[in-house]
Image: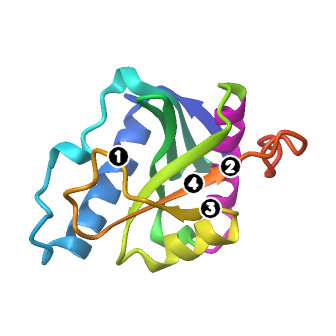
Amino acid sequence: MTLTSVAWSHPDAAALREAQRVEVGQLYAHEASFTPGMPSEEIDSESVVATFVAYDEDLPIGHIALRRLGDELEIKRMYVAPPCRGSGVANDLLVAVEHAAREAGARRLILHTGNQQRAAIAFYGRHGYTPIAVYPPYEDVTYSLCFEKVFSPDSGGGSGAPA
């Protein structure tokens, strides 16, 4: 597995985000507050600080991005292709985005997920993310859960630099 920093618009990154959109859409289709293309899920490419794609040889298998949201840095579109889940790809993606956040001067990193994404919730908990109040623009999304990881100044954020 290799991890590559790419532009937000890179075709492999876009394809992985589309796969995630379809999967999440199926998961939350029954939710009254879910509408495909909802404003809370739109990302201005100018706000994206970093995008990483994981590859198994030439096959794109994972994605994560970091964006500015006001004064914060937020993890967006963490996704690992289903056949590759549990292989450590998500760990490597998270390390890369945490490193990018620290390099950008963040003292904490925030993220939004949904209450049906139990594996994601457990994953982030294992990596030191703790629940916080739902922040804009997600306050009207009834299934929202938000988390933060505060980087300790003496540890450099905890996860280390990307491989």
Query: Splitting the image into 4 quarters, where does residue 8 fall?
Result: top left
Q: Which mark is residue 87?
A: none
For the residue pair 20 and 134, the one nearer the viewer reads as 134
Q: Is residue 131 left or right of residue 99?
A: left
Which residue lies under the disc numbered 2? 150
Q: Which residues are magenta?
A: 86-102
Separation of marks 1 and 4 at Cα, in angstroms: 27 Å
Q: Are marks 4 and 3 in contact (CB under 8 Å)?
A: yes
Residue at disc 3, secondary structure:
loop
**68 lies above or below 26:** above
Q: Nearer the viewer, mark 1 or mark 3?
A: 3
What amino acid type is highlighted by mark number 2? Val
Q: Are marks 4 and 2 in contact (CB under 8 Å)?
A: yes
Q: Which mark is residue 15?
A: 1
Separation of marks 4 and 2 at Cα, in angstroms: 6 Å
Type of secondary structure dominating the magenta stretch: helix
What amino acid type is highlighted by mark number 1? Ala
Question: Residue 16's spot in the image, x, y percent?
Answer: 39, 50
Separation of marks 2 and 1 at Cα, in angstroms: 31 Å
Q: Are marks 1 and 4 in contact (CB under 8 Å)?
A: no
Question: Residue 38's spot in the image, x, y percent?
Answer: 15, 49
x 27%, y 57%: residue: 21
Which residue lies under the disc numbered 4? 148
What amino acid type is highlighted by mark number 3? Tyr
Quarter placement of the C terminus: top right
Q: Mark 3 Cα within 10 Å, few/some/many (few <14, many 20+)?
A: many
